[in-house]
Structure formats: structure tokens, C-alpha cells
Image: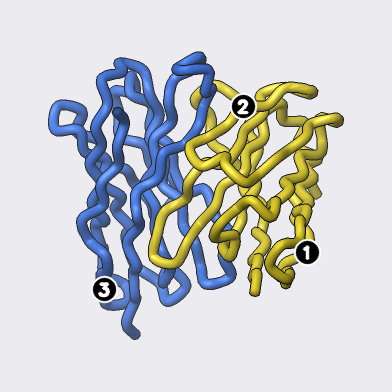
Chain colours: A blue, B yellow
């Protein structure tokens, strides 16, 4: 069965420093997608970054980068130059491939990491 | 502006009543999803629909029902059979495949 594990319930980082949020996944599929979402206190899930299992280069989106280590089944999120507005819950998720049990693109989420940025 | 709307943001109901949560998208996405989030937890899939007039149960479908009569709309009904309905409900849509899902602002349902 597919599973996402986020081992850090909470993290603190000083403003302007970089922080790494850990994510490991378990799947027997060769084709899958990995995502990171941000959930501020308002509740909305904000898509941050995507990595496909066949992508050879790590994904980057502005201050966000995904450290993808396929052999270790890890997909850590790196946030550079942290800002106060980065304080939120962060969720790692994995999509199942099309037609996997009839569930095209369904996301499986980890339990999240609460990031607090200190001024 | 393209996006997903959910209404209302907060909903209160008495135990034993059915309640319907609205989800509308104007992104022209084929696939739509409903998730439930409990405090301190990740999201769990309730129902999903890949195309109009078709939908499938997710991991926790018991006590819920949906319909997909239009591409833009995917309402979720929380029935009285749902034993613990108080939660935060999020609707999402995607173009399908392994693509990212875009979420609405959510509805916080409280049943007393």
C-alpha cells in the first residue's frame, strides 16, 4: 500500500534561514507524482511544488525546492530564506498513477509538519 | 478569476440532519475530489469523480453521498449515517493524471 511519512510534527526556523521538511514515501509503482502543499491557518491548501518519478532533476519553484532521492524514497522540501509568512502546516502527498484501482490521480497525504518562523 | 469555491465557510447542524456542502470550479477540470481533515491529521479521500455522471468511493465514503451532474459542480451530502461528521471538508479539482490538485477554501462543519 502507498504511504507518506512526515516524521517532524513541528519545526522552528529563524527568519531568513533555510529549512528542510522531511518526507518519505512507500510505493511499488514506477510512475507516481510527489507534491508539497502549504496550509495556512485559514485552511486552504496551497500547491507549492511537484516532482514526477521520472524527472531527473530536482524541482524548483522560487524559494521552494524538492530534494528528490528516488533510491531512498525521500522527497524533502527545502525552503530558502524563510519569511514570517511561511509559518503554516506543510503536507507532503503522493499521487497514484492513472487507473490504479480506478483512482486516477488521487492524492495520499502525510500528517503534516507545522513550521514556525521566528523573527 | 479561475478557481474553486466552497460554501458556506462555516456550517452548523443538529445531529440527525443531512447537510449538503457546495463545491464549484471554473477551471474546466474533469476530475473533482472531496477530502476530510480532522485536527492534527492529513487529508483523507471521501469521494472522487473523473467525469460527469460518474464518481467513485474513496477511503472513507461511508455516511457520505455525492453527485456530478455538471462538470463545474460536485456537491457532497453528509448524511445522518455519518457517525462523526464534525470536520473540515476540502474540495479539489485537477485535469487528471498525475497532475496537481487545486483546492477550495474549505467548509468547517460542526454537528452537535
Q: Kindly report the distance in space between the C-alpha atoms of the residues bearing marks 3 and 1.
A: 35 Å
Quadrant location, the C terminus of chain A: bottom left
Looking at the image, which is closer to me, B75 or B6?
Answer: B75
Contact (Cβ within 8 Å) of mark 3 with mark 1: no
Looking at the image, which is closer to me, A72 or A4?
Answer: A4
Q: Is mark 1 on a helix, strand or loop?
A: loop
Q: Is residue A112 left or right of residue B54?
A: left
Q: Is mark 2 on a helix, strand or loop?
A: strand
Residue B92's disc is none
Residue A13's disc is 3
Looking at the image, which is closer to me, A63 or A108?
Answer: A108
Q: Earlier in the sequence, mark 1 or mark 2?
A: 1
| Marks 3 & 1 on one chain | no
- Image depth: mark 1 or mark 2 in front: 2
| Marks 1 & 2 on one chain | yes
Pinpoint the chain carrying mark 2: B
Q: Alpha-carbon neighbours of circle 2 within 10 Å: few (<14), some, or many (≥20)? A: some
Residue at horizontal 31 percent and vertical 18 percent from the top: A29
Q: Kindly report the distance in space between the C-alpha atoms of the residues bearing marks 2 and 3.
A: 41 Å
Pinpoint the chain carrying mark 1: B
Q: Name the residue under label 2.
A: B56
Q: Alpha-carbon neighbours of circle 1 within 10 Å: few (<14), some, or many (≥20)? A: some
* Residue A52 in view of the camera: yes
Residue A69 percent location from the top left of the image: 19, 33
Q: Is residue B70 left or right of residue B42?
A: right
Q: Mark 1 points at which residue?
A: B8
Amino acid at each position: 500500500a502507498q504511504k507518506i511519512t512526515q516524521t517532524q510534527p513541528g519545526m522552528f526556523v529563524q527568519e531568513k534561514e533555510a529549512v528542510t521538511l522531511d518526507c518519505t514515501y512507500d510505493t511499488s509503482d514506477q510512475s507516481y507524482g510527489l507534491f508539497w502543499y502549504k496550509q495556512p491557518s485559514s485552511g486552504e491548501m496551497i500547491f507549492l511544488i511537484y516532482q514526477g518519478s521520472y524527472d531527473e532533476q530536482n524541482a524548483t519553484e522560487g524559494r521552494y525546492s524538492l530534494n528528490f532521492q528516488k533510491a531512498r524514497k525521500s522527497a524533502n522540501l527545502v525552503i530558502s530564506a524563510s519569511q514570517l509568512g511561511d509559518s503554516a502546516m506543510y503536507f507532503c502527498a503522493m499521487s497514484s498513477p492513472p487507473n490504479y484501482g480506478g483512482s486516477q490521480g488521487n492524492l495520499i497525504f502525510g500528517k503534516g509538519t507545522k513550521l514556525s518562523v521566528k523573527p | 478569476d479561475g478557481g474553486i469555491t466552497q460554501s458556506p465557510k462555516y456550517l452548523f447542524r443538529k445531529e440527525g440532519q443531512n447537510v449538503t456542502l457546495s463545491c464549484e470550479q471554473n477551471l474546466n477540470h474533469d476530475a473533482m475530489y472531496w477530502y476530510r481533515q480532522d485536527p492534527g491529521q492529513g487529508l483523507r479521500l471521501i469521494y472522487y469523480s473523473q467525469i460527469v455522471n460518474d464518481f467513485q468511493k474513496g477511503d472513507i465514503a461511508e455516511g457520505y453521498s455525492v453527485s456530478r451532474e455538471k462538470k463545474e459542480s460536485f456537491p457532497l451530502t453528509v448524511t445522518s449515517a455519518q457517525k462523526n461528521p464534525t470536520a473540515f471538508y476540502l474540495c479539489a479539482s485537477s485535469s487528471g493524471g498525475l497532475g496537481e490538485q487545486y483546492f477550495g477554501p474549505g467548509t468547517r462543519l460542526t454537528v452537535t
